[in-house]
Amino acid sequence: MSATSTTTAAKSGKSISPIYIIGALFFVFGFVTWLNSVLIPYLKIACQLNNFESYLVAFAFYIAYLVMAIPSAWVLKKTGFKNGMAVGLLIMGVGALIFVPAAVTRTYALFLTGLFVQGTGLAILQTASNPYITILGPIESAAKRISIMGIFNKVAGSLAPIILGAVTLKDADTLQKKLLTLSIADKQAELNALAHRVILPYLIILAVLVVLAVLIYFSSLPEIDTEKDGPADKTPSATAKTSIFQFPHLLVGALALFLYVGVEVMAGDSVISYGASQGIELSSAKFFTTCTLVGMILGYIAGIIAIPQFISQEKALRMSAVIGILFSLCAIFTTGVQSVLFISLLGLANALMWPALWPLAIKGLGKFTKIGSSFLIMGISGGALIPLLYGFIVDKLTNAGQPKSMAATHGYWVMVPCYVVILYFATAGHKLKSGKV
């Protein structure tokens, strides 16, 4: 089924089922992805890690998008979008299964391996589902459709830290104090028991992923054949393009998406630990990621209402970048609960970035859509490197004598230049495909 025929189906009302199927996949993306916000403080205690080591959770998960994005495009070329989604879900299931021996042995390297495998499965799923929902209708309203998918994603993401946190971080504050008074043998026993808490949740996740893979395989989800479509730009220079590197707006868009995912992951995954550094107990701080994601849901709803009737995708992205800069600076120049609140509010600033970045970067790629999608998926690796850089800076500042609370705050300076680059893409970078701004 070509992109054109799929669009026709969308207009005739036959796309209701595909959209709900993709919505279920975005729910899975969100739930699995935002479990990391709890895994970071949880594994920091269970495996006795410093800040840098704990953020390897995000690194192992998101670096898979960089390593596996091009192989994902190859998989989709062989399997098609639909079967590729089923394969991605099964690979994610393998990653969830690895958590069992990791928890039994309390081996951090195994936890990281499981996260990398989950990220690999998600790379395949994201490479298939994002261009699918972009092509499933007019490109001008793609941000609206992606915003709807984002609500599925962030509702799941807002539930994930509450559910996993209730299991893994139960009485964590009391346990941390207790560990300081125990003998080595008793301490190891307590840490082993803590590590085992994650086994049942991940076995349930495994079962859900397998069921979804079977449902996707036997679903009526239509296939999209982008290979038959030339570039949307029909000028001689566009139709003569032979390489993905001849689309500079895509390359700048991939960089912007790299930085956006980095700051989004920092806001969501670091806020629990950041709240703890500001003297807030983990029993309360575990809800901060949910607050961040609720802010994103509100932003998505605004996007659904406003795009493209009242504002364009470009303007929404510009506004989001400016708000991101302002909230980052407010978080840096305030302290305590107020500073944590501004980090949580970054969810509102980040909400429309993915929905707007994706269609602006992928517009006009035609037969290069799959490989272009892979480039954008590689940009998700920003979630691996930028939070890790944040953890490194916080440790360095702490070791240099800064109080932990201040070091954790100053680490957020990393965010400001990221939002500046996103603002550039929103104002000028997305126009580079024409060879001029």
Image: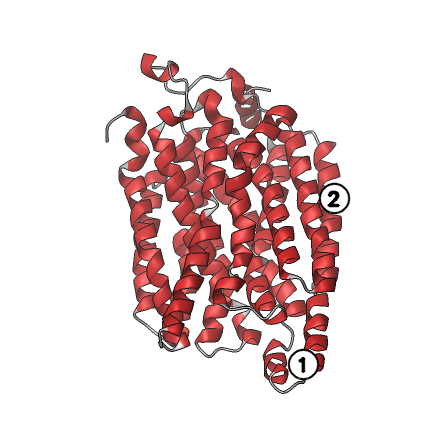
Q: Nearer the viewer, residue 348 or 69?
A: 69
Q: Is residue 120 above or below residue 46?
A: above
Q: Helix or strand or loop: what does disc 1 sit on?
A: helix
Please say if 162 is above or below 228: below
Left or right: 200 in relation to 332: right
Query: In the rendered image, which residue does mark 2 sit on?
Result: 210
Q: Residue 252: give its label.
A: none
Q: Foreground: 355 or 107? A: 107
**Is residue 297 rendered to the left or right of residue 46?**
left
Image location (x, y in percent) of residue 94:
71, 46
Classify 10 Å Cα crowding around label 2: few (below 14), some (14-19), many (20 and above): some
Q: Find residue 332 and report its horizontal and vertical position in percent.
A: 32, 67
Earlier in the chain: of badge 1 and badge 2, it is 1
| Residue under the image location 52 percent in, 63 percent down | 53
Place of residue 359 in the rendered image (x, y in percent of width and height, measured from the top left): 42, 34
> From the image, which quarter does the N terminus lie in?
top right
Q: Which mark is residue 184?
A: 1
Q: Residue at x 49, y 53 (%)?
A: 297
Residue 338 seen in the current view:
no
* Amino acid carrying mark 1 in the image: Ile
Which residue is painted at 40% across and 48% down in the image?
260
Q: Residue at x 30, y 63 (%)?
A: 329
